[in-house]
Amino acid sequence: MMRAICLAMFMVSRLAPAQVLTVETLPPLAQARSNNAVAAVTTDRGVYLYSFLGLGSGKTWRDISAAASVLGPGAGHWRELGPVPGDRGRLAAAAVAAGGAAWLFGGYTVDLEGGEVSTAGVYRIRPGEAGVRRVTAMPVAVDDTVALVYRDRYVYLFSGWHDLGNVNLVQVFDTQTLEWTQATPWPGTPVFGHAGGGSDGRLLVCDGVGIQYPATGGKREFLPSGECWLGEIDRDDYRRIHWRPAPSHPGKPRYRMAAAADDHGRVVFAGGSINPYNYDGIGYNGVEANAEKTVISFDLDDGRWRVEGDLPTATMDHRGLPFAGGWFYVIGGMREGQTPAAGVFRFRLDTSRRASASGDADQ
């Protein structure tokens, strides 16, 4: 009943023309990388883009990278920073920018037999530094989580995977004191591979994959989740989050979209796949996953979903969508044919061409 009441508060808006994005190409990564953690740190000199870890073009456990690289303001190529500390590469880590630094959280390792282990390391690098430094560890190691920043200080990790299953934890990291605390738990089905964004203490997190256990026993299933949740961080206590359900976005649920909030209170989602998959791009159902190219947004002020247009290429397997200076940055990812990519581009929403018509969107 509560969800039905909440749904009535939102609308979905169609746009015409379909393409309302401005796109620019940037220097590519030195090597193809998919499932890499990414961040954008803004300084007086400009924007520094970071890429950490991820999967190379071979798509086997041997191709999981520990590399870190940066594209500085006005640079013509990415500069390698050396490996992220640790004994091997990782996938599904999360990165954010806070307090003038890039922060990297977790991820998982894969061994020869395909065993996957969540890792707890937390790392930091500031523009101008030569390498990535480990600073602490998570209380509960998670990967494929959503990391969002509040007040340029607190990093929230929403749900995600821990070794054998999803968790409903919301872990909060203080980048000034390097201390952890727990916030109001995730209110929905615990998921991994979800996506979201936050602005001024308001946030929206959507989709991902939940686990279904057959009532009569047997093999568990990894199934798409169409849940979206709005949260508002309590102004007097950053550990309290006031949650309420939001409507699902237009179209089917997506896995590993790129997502972020802009400075106008819009949470933007790009790409992803409607078929959840293992790290090689093959679905848990045994079918090859295909990337999407549509960009959608949710306005935290007016409560509307909007279809913003299409990216120049379909893309999936993202761990973030850095936003800086009015631009959203797509760094690497997996393209057509489940192929890791080195390509980097940025886009922005052309709000001057918005259509005012509204109505139901196809689901």
Image (cartoon, rainbow, N blue to C red):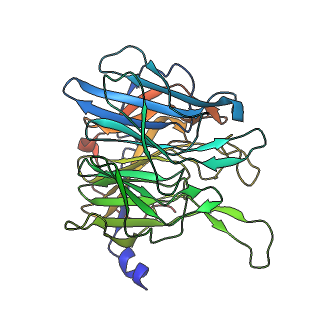
Residue lying at 40% horizontally and 83% vertically, measured from the top left: 2
The residue closer to the viewer here, 85 or 336, is: 85
Specify whether residue 320 is in view.
no
The structure residue drawn at horizontal position 56% and vertical position 64%, both measured from the top left corner, is 225
Residue 331 image point, x, y percent: 46, 32
Residue 347 screen position, x and y as percent = 36, 34
The answer to whether residue 61 of the structure is visible from this angle is yes
Q: Residue furthest top?
A: 76
Which quarter of the image is occupied by the N terminus?
A: bottom left
Residue 70 lies, with reference to residue 206, above or below; the image says above
26 left or right, relative to 66: left
Q: How many marks?
A: 0
Residue placed farthest to the bottom in the image?
1
Looking at the picture, how far across and down is residue 23, in whole percent? 37, 30
On the picture, is 231 further left or further right than 210?
Answer: left
The reply, left or right, for residue 118 in relation to residue 132 is right
Q: Is residue 159 left or right of residue 22?
A: right
Quadrant in the rendering for residue 32: top right
83 lies above or below 95 = above
Q: Residue at x 42, y 62 (%)?
A: 170
Measured as percent of width and height from the top left, residue 156 is found at 37, 55
Of the pair 202 and 52, the residue shown nearer to us: 52
Which one is nearer the viewer's eye here, 307 or 283? 283
